[in-house]
Image: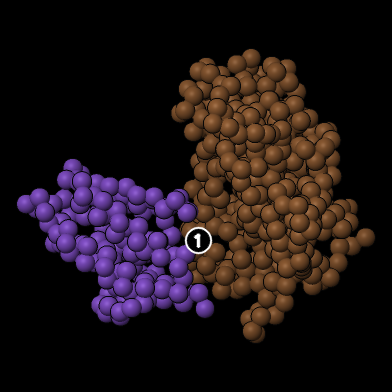
Chain colours: A purple, B brown
């Protein structure tokens, strides 16, 4: 049942507003759209020593999966550098492709694997963060 | 007469039981309509008995293929009440047809010329004109919308001025189902010698269109929304309008003669059909239009009216539902878009899928319309002759469930 996608753990992540919003004077910011549905994610970050994420905020106009992904990513991005975020993206891709069971918090999204049309909902926040860190 | 939806459904192999899976409540025909067995059989028959290129070979197989292709063109001309099958150009779809007109027109446009479209357009009747604006420095004007999503025609003269060269509008919105009142648009365009292109992608699937009565210069639609295959569409153009256009693509099949000094081009429609056309798809489309014509149009209209009325009434009883589009049943096709407060359209569609209800969620390739009406996305249920009350009940139950799960 597709309803299982909306298990409590994902709903809790989607409704968690700890990192929702915008930062005053971010060091970097990026916005990406999902052209399929028009969803939009904006990520603001503050960086310590120009490299490590010290603060992060996300603004998501999107579905529950996108919001849940933004929350999880924001938690894991605290203290991360660009390589750590690339590794996080890699873990997500491994989970979605089904080649590896990554374990950890990200495995909450395992059921999304069967729904290819929703993979980009999970990717959008992390791709936006990578875009911000590229700037 | 009452529409026999059971008998209609039985004509569609997609609704037959497959491996114990419950049949889908298919409410996404505005995106792609399903194909009846007669269409699938016509394609299979052609591909297994007459498959060859057209208008090239003299052998019997090529003669059969060319004849079938020519018959298909005539069937389409008849469906549109075109004066000649030479007015029918095969394309890959509505998008391709509109791009063809935009690119062919480009050389005759100059800076300061104006093209008028509306905010109700699908991106396929929006982006090609924006691209033309960038290429040629023309102006693009947008007819606004009424609050119910209908195109606001109250101030046409302000938009369609003597600088206007073309008005390009949808015949029926793919989001709201609203049918455009084309008469004043055509009259306004005529008064300034502008041409009119009508996007019929959402209208042609609902029955024959009379292009002579409409009075436009171009009419375009897609095969796959008309119960036919993907990969084929139609550009109808008035003979004089097509003859005035240069080709947009070069290649085989569209020439009169080619030499190192230069090329002279064939007359329409061949001028616009460079390369091998979508032959079996055109034959499938012709069969699909025959299938539409086999339905009783009055019974179909009554059926849609009943289902639409019931759906709109029931939807309004669900807390948090907003319907995008006109609530009255006049001049409206059975396309119903809505939002549910506190739930994202894709999440709703996902829950609906778990109830075997296929709907579309998102901006429906109509972001300017969504923005103008204050929405970023919506769920859309679109009906076809194979839909009945059971599909509507499944939809409504699914929405109730989505409201519980998602909010």
Q: Is residue B145 visible?
A: no
Tell which of A85 and B243 is nearer to you.
B243
Decide: few, some or many residues near mark 1? Use Cα within 10 Å; few <14, some 14-19, many ≥20: many
Which residue is labeled 1 in the image?
Answer: B346
Q: Residue at x 66, y 53 (%)?
A: B278
Q: Position of residue B231 (x, y in %)?
A: 63, 54
In the image, is A83 to the left or to the right of A32?
left
Q: Position of residue B368 (x, y in %)?
A: 52, 39
In the image, is B391 to the left or to the right of B353?
right
Tell which of B317 and A72 is nearer to you.
A72
In the image, is B162 to the left or to the right of B203?
left
Q: Residue at x 79, y 70 (%)?
A: B11
Vertical arrangement, residue B22 with respect to residue B311, above or below: below
Q: Position of residue B20 (x, y in %)?
A: 65, 85
Tell which of B75 and A11 is nearer to you.
B75
Check the residue under mark 1 and report the chain it is in: B
Q: Residue at x 60, y 73 (%)?
A: B355
User: Farthest top residue?
Assistant: B162
User: Farthest bottom residue?
Assistant: B20
Tell which of B98 and B46 is nearer to you.
B46
User: Farthest front residue?
Assistant: B260
Quarter occupied by residue B252: top right
User: Farthest left residue?
Assistant: A49
Q: Is residue A124 visible?
A: yes
């Amino acid at each position: 049942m597709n309803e299982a996608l909306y298990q409590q753990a994902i709903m809790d992540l989607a409704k968690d507003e700890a990192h929702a919003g915008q930062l005053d004077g971010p060091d970097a910011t990026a916005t990406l759209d999902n052209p399929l549905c028009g969803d939009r994610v904006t990520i603001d970050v503050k960086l310590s020593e120009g490299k490590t994420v010290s603060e992060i905020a996300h603004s998501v106009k999107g579905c529950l999966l996108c919001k849940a992904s933004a929350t999880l990513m924001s938690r894991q991005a605290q203290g991360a550098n660009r390589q750590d975020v690339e590794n996080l993206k890699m873990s997500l891709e491994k989970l979605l492709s089904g080649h590896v069971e990554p374990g950890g918090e990200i495995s909450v999204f395992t059921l999304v694997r069967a729904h290819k049309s929703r993979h980009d909902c999970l990717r959008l926040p992390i791709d936006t963060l990578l875009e911000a860190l590229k700037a | 007469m009452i529409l026999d939806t059971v008998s209609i459904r039985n004509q569609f192999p997609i609704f037959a039981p497959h491996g114990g899976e419950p049949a889908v409540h298919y409410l996404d025909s505005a995106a792609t309509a399903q194909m009846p067995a007669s269409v699938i059989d016509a394609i299979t028959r052609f591909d297994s008995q007459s498959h060859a290129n057209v208008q090239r070979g003299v052998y019997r197989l090529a003669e059969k293929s060319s004849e079938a292709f020519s018959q298909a063109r005539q069937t389409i001309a008849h469906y549109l009440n075109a004066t000649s099958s030479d007015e029918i150009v095969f394309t890959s779809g509505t998008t391709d047809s509109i791009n063809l007109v935009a690119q062919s027109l480009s050389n005759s446009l100059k800076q300061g010329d104006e093209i008028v479209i509306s905010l109700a357009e699908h991106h396929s009747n929006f982006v090609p004109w924006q691209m033309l604006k960038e290429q040629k420095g023309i102006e693009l004007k947008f007819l606004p919308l009424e609050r119910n999503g209908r195109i606001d025609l109250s101030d046409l003269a302000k938009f369609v001025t003597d600088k206007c060269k073309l008005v390009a509008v949808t015949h029926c919105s793919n989001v709201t189902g609203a049918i455009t009142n084309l008469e004043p648009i055509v009259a306004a365009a005529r008064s300034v010698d502008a041409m009119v292109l009508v996007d019929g992608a959402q209208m042609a699937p609902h029955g024959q269109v009379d292009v002579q009565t409409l009075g436009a210069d171009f009419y375009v639609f897609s095969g796959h929304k008309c119960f036919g295959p993907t990969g084929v569409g139609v550009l109808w153009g008035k003979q004089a309008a097509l003859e005035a256009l240069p080709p947009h693509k070069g290649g085989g099949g569209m020439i009169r003669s080619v030499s190192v000094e230069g090329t002279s081009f064939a007359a329409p429609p061949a001028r616009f059909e460079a390369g091998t056309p979508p032959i079996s798809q055109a034959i499938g489309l012709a069969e699909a239009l025959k299938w539409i014509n086999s339905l009783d149009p009055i019974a179909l209209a009554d059926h849609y009216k009943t289902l639409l009325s019931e759906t709109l009434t029931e939807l309004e009883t669900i807390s948090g539902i907003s319907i995008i589009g006109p609530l009255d049943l006049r001049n409206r096709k059975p396309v119903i878009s809505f939002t549910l407060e506190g739930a994202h359209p894709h999440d709703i569609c996902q829950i609906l899928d778990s109830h075997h209800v296929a709907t579309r969620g998102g901006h429906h390739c109509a972001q300017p319309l969504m923005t103008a009406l204050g929405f970023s996305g919506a769920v859309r249920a679109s009906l076809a002759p194979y839909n009945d009350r059971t599909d509507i009940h499944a939809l409504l139950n699914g929405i109730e469930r989505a409201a519980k799960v998602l909010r």
